[in-house]
C-alpha cells in the first residue's frame, strides 16, 4: 500500500505545484492525509461527468437526435429548459436533505448512477425510437437525468468542500476541464471522419460512452474517503422560500437582476436551434455533428479566459455584452438560413454561429454568477443563489414551452430573430443594473 500512496502524492504535487501534499488550510487533519488520493478520485470523477455532459448535451447531441428521429420541432425547445430546470428547481429541497447526512458521498453516487442509467436508455432510444413517440420518450428520460444531475451536483460541491482544501479546488476543476475538453474534441474529430454516414448507431455509441462516464463518476465518488460533517444549521425548504420571496419584494436590485437573468435565457435557448439549422441545411450526416462538437469544444476553452477578468472588473457589463452577443449570433443564424446561397447549405456557417453563441453563453453564465455573488451579503448569499436558481428553473420550463410553440409556428430562423430581440432587451436591462464590484 505504501508505494501507491507515494505515487499518488507525487502525482498530486506535480498537478498542484505543491512541494508538500500534506499542507491544508480549511479541512481536518484526517481529510488532509487523504487529500492526494481524494484529489485524483475527484479528478477522474469530474472527467467522467464533464465528458458525459458534452456527449449527452441538450444543446447539441439531443437536438441532433430528435432531428434524426423526425420528432416535432416544438420538442427541441424543451430540451435545454428540462435539462436546466431539472437541476435548478429542487435545489432548496435537496440541500436540506444533504445537510442532514454526516456522510454525503452516497447522494453523489446515487445521482451518478441514475444519470448513467438515463444515458443508457437514451442510447437505446437512438437505435429504436422515432417520430413523436420517440421524441416524447427522450424528453421523459431527460427529466429523470436532469433531476439526478441536480442531486449529484449539490452533493459534489459539498464533498469537495470537505475533502479538498482551499486554493486546490480551482486547480482540480481546471485540470478536469482541460482533460475532458481534449477528450470531447477527440470524439468530435472521430465523428468528422465518418462524414456522410447515417447517425443512429453513432449517436447510440456517444450516449453509451456518456453512460460510462457517469458510471465512472459514481465509482470514483464511492471510493472517496470522506470524514463525517456537521448536520446542524439546515433550514426548512418552505421557510427558505418564504424568506426568499420577502427578499425578492424588498430588494429591488435582486428583482431587477432576476429580470435581466430571465431575458438572458435567450443565449441558452438559441443553441439547440442553431444545431438543428446546421442539420437541416447541411444534412444529418455524422460529419456535421462532429464539426459542431469540435467548434463547441474550442469555443468553450476560449470563453473563460475571454470573460474572466472582465467579470471581475464589471459583471454588469459582461451581462450587457452577453445580451448584445446573443442578439448578434441569433440574427446571423437567421440570416444564414434565409440566404439562398450554396455555401449556406452546409454545416459550416451554423458551426460559426454555434461557436459564437457558446462563447456568449459562457460570458452570460460567468457574468450573472459573479454579479449575484458580489451583490448578495455573506449572511444571505446562499439563499439568494438558491432562490435565483429556483426562479430561473421555473422560468426555463415556462419560456421553453413558449419558444417551442413559436418554433413550430414561425420556423427555426424566425424564432432566432425573436430570440435576437430578447437578447437586445436583456442588454438594455443589464445596462441599467447598478455596479456591485
Image (cartoon, rainbow, N blue to C red):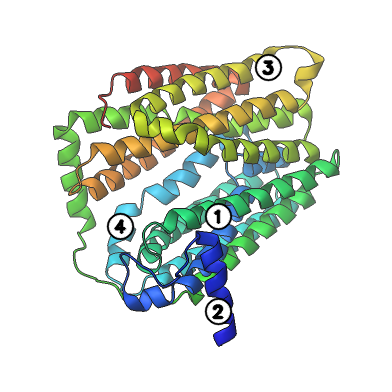
Q: Residue at x 32, y 40 (%)?
A: 391
Closer to the eye: label 4 or 1: 1
Horizontal and vertical percent for residue 97? 30, 65
Q: Secondary structure at mark 2?
A: helix
Q: Which mark is residue 6?
A: 2
| Observer able to see residue 69 | yes
In this figure, which residue is indicated by the disc labeled 4? Answer: 93
Q: Which mark is residue 327?
A: none
Q: The N terminus is located in which quarter?
A: bottom right
Q: Is residue 123 above or below residue 348?
A: below
Q: Residue at x 47, y 59 (%)?
A: 148
In this figure, which residue is indicated by the disc labeled 1? Answer: 175
**How much space separates mark 4 and mark 1, taking CA atoms?**
31 Å
Q: Which mark is residue 336?
A: 3
**How much space separates mark 2 and mark 3, taking CA atoms?**
57 Å
**Which of the two discs, 4 and 3, labels the residue nearer the N terminus?**
4
Closer to the eye: label 1 or 2: 2
- Residue reaching furthest front? 19
Q: Is residue 6 above or below residue 154?
A: below
Horizontal and vertical percent for residue 288? 76, 35
Q: Are marks 1 and 3 in contact (CB under 8 Å)?
A: no
Amino acid at each position: 500500500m505504501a508505494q501507491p500512496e507515494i505515487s499518488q502524492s507525487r502525482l498530486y504535487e506535480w498537478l498542484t505545484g505543491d512541494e508538500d501534499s500534506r499542507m491544508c488550510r480549511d479541512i481536518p487533519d484526517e481529510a488532509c492525509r487523504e487529500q492526494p488520493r481524494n484529489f485524483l478520485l475527484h479528478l477522474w470523477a469530474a472527467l467522467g461527468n464533464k465528458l458525459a455532459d458534452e456527449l449527452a448535451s441538450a444543446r447539441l447531441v439531443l437536438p441532433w437526435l430528435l432531428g434524426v428521429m423526425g420528432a416535432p420541432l416544438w420538442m427541441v425547445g424543451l430540451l435545454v429548459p428540462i435539462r436546466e430546470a431539472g437541476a435548478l428547481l429542487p435545489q432548496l429541497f435537496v440541500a436540506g436533505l444533504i445537510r442532514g447526512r454526516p456522510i454525503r458521498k452516497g447522494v453523489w453516487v446515487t445521482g451518478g448512477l441514475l444519470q448513467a442509467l438515463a444515458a443508457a436508455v437514451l442510447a437505446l432510444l437512438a437505435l429504436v425510437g422515432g417520430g413523436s413517440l420517440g421524441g416524447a420518450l427522450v424528453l421523459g428520460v431527460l427529466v429523470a437525468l436532469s433531476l439526478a444531475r441536480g442531486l449529484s451536483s449539490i452533493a459534489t460541491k459539498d464533498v469537495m468542500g470537505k475533502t479538498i482544501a482551499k486554493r486546490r479546488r480551482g486547480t482540480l476543476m481546471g485540470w478536469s476541464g482541460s482533460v475532458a475538453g481534449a477528450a470531447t474534441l477527440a470524439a468530435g474529430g472521430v465523428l468528422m471522419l465518418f462524414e456522410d454516414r447515417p447517425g443512429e448507431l453513432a449517436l447510440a455509441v456517444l450516449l453509451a460512452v456518456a453512460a460510462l462516464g457517469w458510471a465512472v463518476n459514481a465509482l470514483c465518488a464511492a471510493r472517496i474517503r470522506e470524514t463525517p460533517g456537521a448536520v446542524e444549521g439546515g433550514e426548512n425548504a418552505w421557510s427558505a422560500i418564504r424568506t426568499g420571496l420577502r427578499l425578492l419584494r424588498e430588494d429591488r436590485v435582486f428583482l431587477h437582476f432576476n429580470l435581466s437573468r430571465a431575458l438572458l435565457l435567450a443565449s441558452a435557448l438559441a443553441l439547440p436551434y442553431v444545431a438543428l439549422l446546421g442539420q437541416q441545411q447541411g444534412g444529418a450526416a455524422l460529419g456535421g455533428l462532429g464539426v459542431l462538437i469540435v467548434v463547441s469544444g474550442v469555443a468553450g476553452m476560449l470563453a473563460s479566459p475571454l470573460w474572466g477578468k472582465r467579470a471581475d472588473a464589471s459583471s454588469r457589463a459582461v451581462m450587457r455584452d452577453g445580451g448584445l452577443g446573443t442578439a448578434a449570433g441569433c440574427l446571423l443564424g437567421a440570416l444564414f438560413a434565409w440566404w439562398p446561397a450554396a455555401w449556406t447549405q452546409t454545416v459550416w456557417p451554423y458551426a460559426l454561429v454555434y461557436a459564437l453563441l457558446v462563447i456568449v453563453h459562457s460570458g452570460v453564465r460567468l457574468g450573472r454568477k459573479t454579479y449575484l455573488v458580489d451583490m448578495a451579503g455573506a449572511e444571505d448569499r446562499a439563499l439568494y443563489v438558491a432562490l435565483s436558481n429556483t426562479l430561473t428553473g421555473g422560468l426555463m420550463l415556462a419560456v421553453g414551452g413558449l419558444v417551442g410553440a413559436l418554433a413550430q409556428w414561425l420556423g427555426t430562423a424566425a424564432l432566432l430573430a425573436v430570440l435576437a430581440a430578447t437578447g437586445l432587451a436583456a442588454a438594455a436591462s443589464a445596462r441599467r443594473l447598478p455596479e456591485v464590484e
